Amino acid sequence: MSPSVLIAGAGPTGLTLALDLARRNVAVRIVDRAVEFCPGSRGDGIQPRTLEVFDDLGVLDAVWTAGAPAPVMRAYLDGQPVGERRMAEPVDPTPAVPYPNGWFLGQAQTEAILRARLAEFGVRVELGTTLLSFTQDDSGVTAHVSSDRGTETVRAAYLVGADGGGSTVRKQAGIAFEGTTDESLRMLLGDVRADALDHDYGYWFAAAAEPTRGIALSPLPGGRHFQFAAPFAEGTEPGLEALQAAVNRWTGRSDITLTELIWVTVWRPNTRLAERFRAGRVLLAGDAAHVHPPTGGQGMNTGIQDAYNLGWKLAAALTGDDEPLSTYEPERRAVAARVLGISSALLGKLVDGAEDAMERGEETRQLDISYRDPADTRPVAVGDRAPDAPLKGADGRSLRLFDLFRGPHATLLRFGTAGELPALPGTRSYAVIEPGTPVTGPAVIDVEGHARAAYHAGPGTRVLIRPDGYIGHID
């Protein structure tokens, strides 16, 4: 069977999109030129908004089990301990924001969880399968892919490039990748064991004269490895020897022996944004569309949310409703540009040695991303993230608004009145009523008024929640 959507690239972005499409019964095929899955941690910080996406996709419990909260970092200057700190202090959950803090899990583990969930829908990543070329016409895309089975022609309604910063899809679509690459600043990144260090903590080693220039080791959940980051010495070969030399230099200790190198790379600041995210039936997402500095932990999360925004819109287009898909590029490109600005500003602080260079604020949680019209001044604007709130079902069981939203459907909430609800295609409708109101039809009880407060709702207010958890309409 020919896929409706062909996805090139099986990192977090491609996997999220494939999963979102598969649960909508869209025929999808996902290929990756790599011959094996990358074992490295790479993007290990999962932001609060991404946790909400994972809740909807049915992988949050697995992510909770495998991951860990942000570690306390122990700082050393000239080999002497100078204190402990976190990049961001943990905050308590609220009815509107159930997952307010970031979560840490190596990217390889995150990808494995997404692949396992995708396999439940009968879809598996095709490794060692390279997209060679493609053409498109008014009704679809014809792609040529190569694997150990030979060259194959694949016909699909849409092609999505989630194939990284060097994207074949973007290049062959003729889309410019605007931005800069800074060759003057290079970092050595890798995953290693350092058994002399307590794995319950992270570490920062630097010289007192340059407190923001040094090496960081962050514990990776599920084992004894640390993610390692250090300035890269030109003329050295990236590997265990170079990592060990950096440890010896910056710690001033001889008892820290690095072992079991899993993954290593040389990173340089590469800040770029695709001129377009769409060319006809070809679309870009994740690093193929925008490349970020790692500061702030934004890159992987932004790609995952590209996919979450795109999935329901592709599904709608496949049924003949093209309007939602036309909003993908303007919505997500604006977000990517904003996030690139945040990441670049944090990198600038780090390079300049600012005292707050390691601190992370509200803007990195990605809960304030909005697709609203700037002219919309309503208290809850169309395009904002839809808040959560505790409720009770008509049978008295506890549930949440997120429980109502979970799934491939849109959700209509009508506040204050029970009774007949409109039947809208692809939408589940609920009356949100106060305690003591007679229950008729699909209704949930706003026992403590948190839902009404979150949506500034009066009697009869109707709120349509898009499938990606953003407010689509209020009246």
Image (cartoon, grey):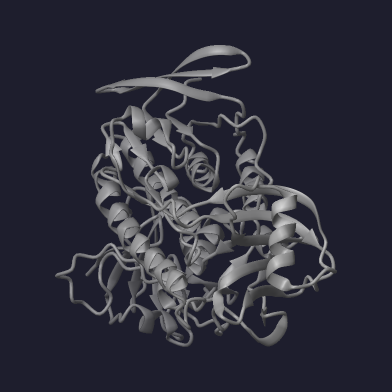
Residue 172 is left or right of residue 391, and the answer is left
Q: Position of residue 201 (x, y in %)?
A: 73, 75
Height in image: 232 above or below 117?
Answer: below
Number of numbered labels in the structure image: 0
Q: Position of residue 60 (x, y in %)?
A: 61, 61
Q: Quadrant of the C terminus?
A: bottom left
Residue 277 is left or right of residue 305, and the answer is left
Height in image: 29 above or below 238?
Answer: above
Height in image: 160 above or below 462?
Answer: above
Q: Residue furthest left?
A: 375
Name the residue nearer the viewer: 178 or 132.
Answer: 178
Name the residue nearer the viewer: 423 or 403.
Answer: 403
Q: Residue furthest front?
A: 235
Name the residue nearer the viewer: 67 or 460.
Answer: 67
At a point 37% along the width and 21% down the height, the residue shown is 134
Q: Position of residue 157 (x, y in %)?
A: 36, 27
Residue 228 is left or right of residue 26, and the answer is right
Q: Position of residue 90 (x, y in %)?
A: 58, 82
Name the residue nearer the viewer: 187 or 338.
Answer: 187
At a point 62% along the width and 29% down the height, the residue shown is 127
Q: Residue furthest top?
A: 150
